[in-house]
Image (spheres, rainbow, N blue to C red):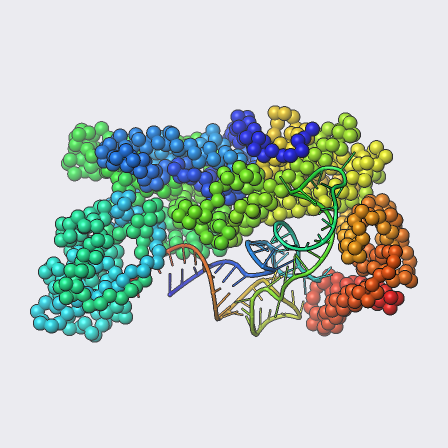
Amino acid sequence: MMDKHYDPKAVEAKWYPRWEAQGCFHDDPASGGKPYAVVIPPPNVTGILHMGHALNQTIQDVLVRWHRMCGDNTCWMPGTDHAGIATQNVVEKALRKEGKRRQDLGREAFIERVWEWRKEYGGTIVRQQRKLGNSTDWTRERFTMDEGLSAAVAKVFCDLYNKGLIYRGNYIVNWCPRCGTALADDEVEHEPNNGNLWYVRYPVVGSENDYVTVATTRPETLPGDTAVAVNPKDERYAHLKGKKVLLPLTGREIPVVFDDYVEKEFGTGVVKITPAHDANDFAVGQRHNLPQVDVMNDDGTMNARSGYEGMDRFECRKAIVEDLEKGGYLVKIEPYQNQIGHCYRCHTVVDSRLSKQWFVKMKPLAQPAIEAVRKGEVSILPKRWESVYFNWMENIRDWCISRQIWWGHRIPVYTCACGHEWASPTAPDSCPKCGAGTTAITQDPDVLDTWFSSWLWPFSTFGWPKKTAELDFYYPTADLVTGADILFFWVARMMMAGYEFMGKAPFKNIILHGIVRDAQGRKMSKSLGNSLDPLEVINQYSADALRFSLALITSMETDTKVDMSKFEIGRNFGTKLWNAARFLQMNAEKLGDFSFADYANDTLVLDASLLHDDDRHLLLKTNHVCAAMEAALKKYRIQEGALAIYDFAWVDFCDWYLEYAKGDLNAEDAARRRQVMALLADVYGKILRLLHPYMPFVTEEIWHQLGYCSEEASIMRAPYPTGYTTGQQTAWGLSEEVLAYVETKRELITGTRSLRAEANVPPALAVNVLLHPANSSLEAKLSRDIDSLKAAIRAEAITFITEAPAKAMPSKLLTAGMVYLPLEGLIDTKAEAEKLEKEIVKLQGFLKGINAKLSNEAFVSKAPEAIIQNQRDRKVELEAQIAALEARKSAL
RNA sequence: GGGGGAUUAGCUCAGUUGGUUAGAGCGUCUGCUUGACAUGCAGAAGGUCACUGGUUCGAGUCCAGUAUCUCCCACCA
């Protein structure tokens, strides 16, 4: 017997290792079939599971499990990302506790230390992913620093290098002084900053009282100025042509240059130019051949050239402002809000800094990736992201790929003492040019941006550059599911790598979902302390509840707001299913030799002569829900699918059909009892399978508890239900008329219950009900269903009447007809009259609208016939109803 | 500065190509420990679909504008 209460903790802990051990997540190219491959966005190896992962992976697992049940050859590739800067930061932090820096260990020992860390703690997130129920094929798990993936990185670098698509250059890059490395443009987060605009006077050389005033937000870079610039059209400064100004505090003379870059309206119209510390100034400097004076060190302190050696950059800012003031150079200070960049890893204020870095030329790589989306070879959902993608790709800038850290793929560029430089996927023994040995050869000290390995993920994980069966079979992968926040970082770059190295798209569909936010709509973050821990949700409610609730509340179009209470939806649904299963099990046992295994394969046979319309209604609705699920999942409308199965299981199956079936399950007719049970088993089995992709654990548990499959088998490989065949439907007499009739009957039930409640009839009291049916055929049908009808509305008797009763009594107008409650004692005729009047006014309102439409020449001539007929039918119906209500009212 | 998104019940959100009386969950109110389920059942209240105009026989849905909120991109010192 099933337990009275479902225990998700025990059940989830039991199934996952079993699935994994039995190879349920594993498919092989050799077994053929239609490939369905998905690569997981690899989480950082330092990461811990957050709600974003839970959402992202729920969507993927729904798709993957669905495809697997549809019989596809499925591969969901798991793995982690070595996350260069983030991981190095974590290990350095640990070192600091021991009072050491990475430099104290040296490069090799430090890297060794990171690997140790990875061995010990790197498994956290993949353990946590298992708690979610991800059906990832763990036998294929990859890490971006694996040997194979590293080989792919080296080959890609060398190929691009040899093609001339990788170059080294002295450029302004974003520099994080805390991480001590360059950052790519998109690794910098701009945030508003309440700063100042300092107005500083620069004397003009050669004239007594003439000076220019520049406005700057970063006075500490002043010692690095090598010019001031004005707009050539700015007449205020035309006289400065060929002049020099004196750089305050330094005594250096710097030229005045004329450049369109300067906005006349901003500040004073004069800009100080610091080519070594600002991207724009760098460009101006190039145009005017200005020297570049770097005044800072790697760690954000000032260097000797600044004259403030060793001082922190922000301290120096204060010091310089003070010195300027003392020297009489400071004109004024205005509060000013601008955007300043922060490191996306450690949030330190990023500096623009001149340095030598490696870059990838992106324009040639972007072209095929743009074409692919334009031609529809790859589609992006929701579609609106396409324009964002195009916009970025068409304005793409070169990618700074070198990082001045130690943890990562070291740049495979070697330099010989003879001056020769070349790229090699493996460490060279000698210089290919002069033949000198290893002692003369040095490797570039930098490592590659982490994304330089993850952009290869869709094929490097399948073994590339080796030719493997997996690569051949699963590439291009099918769907890529990720948050829109890494569209540029990752998705766009994978597109480029796919076309460049494989000659094919990496995936066919890109599915972008929103971000998970807190109840107030804020991003979840550690600093705000508003993060919900998925593991805590699993602990409190179960993984199934987490998954189902997320699926149900997440629309593809917008971000998702969650709070703890949202997960009750999934938990309650799981409980509902569990209890329905218990009900089925109890009734099956009463029958004796009933086996659910006979109903696991969609081969239901029914005796049509024993079928009731409510059975047919359920069968029809089952067909509908199967179709709805397929349609929803095909369109990646995960939420729609969740809603469809939720509604069907809860409302149609439990609320209506189970209640209806109770009567027959307790009746004398053994054949009928058995058939109802068969029907229940068949439909419930479909519910479990339809739902399994969303709630894998509870569905598997019930599938086994009821005995739909053998001990060793799994619902994971049971066929996904497609609904009943047309042959079955015809044999069973399923039709739209049946559907309409049962809906009418249900309205009668609901309406009568409502009438009882309004009339304050005690729930337990069986009453007599009079029904004046809308038509005779309905009366005939309802007569056949009279027992279940009586049970549903707790009626002692239901009497069909042909005319309205003379006595005043509570009544209600329904599609099925007019229902009366012949109650003992007095009824409030005044209240009753008011109620009727209200109803009449409402119906007359509708009727007026319909009459207006029907008498509108344009409507009648232009609207489709079906719509017009619909309105005509409605009009007749309304008129009859109003007449009935009027009659009732006058009878009071 | 450029671009996107959102605005529907007290709250969180559905609403597919325009077509009967706009839906769900939660919350609220009333009543139920009825033989699967109180993590439940039955019933009820609650909406000028942000605003203005347009297209249309017909608009929550399409178009334009306005307002508020949000996100992304961008080199204004």
Please report the residue visible at 29 percent of the width from the left and 64 percent of the height from the top: A335
Residue A280: percent from left, percent from top: 25, 58
Q: Position of residue A193 (x, y in %)?
A: 32, 58
Residue A558 vs A26, above or below: the answer is: below
- Kindly indicate the quadrant of the structure image that contains residue A247: bottom left
> Can the viewer see residue A315?
yes
A264 relative to A591 in the view: left or right = left
In the displayed structure, B52 sits above or below A509; it is below
Q: In the rendered image, which quarter is residue A863 located in?
A: bottom right
The quadrant of the rendering that contains the N terminus of chain A is: top right
Q: Is residue A729 visible?
A: no
Q: Residue at x 13, y 60 (%)?
A: A249
Along the viewing direction, whichever of A761 and A385 lies nearer the viewer: A761
Q: Name which residue lies at 11% across and 62% down.
A: A253
The mark total stands at 0
Observer-nearest residue: A376 or A683?
A: A683
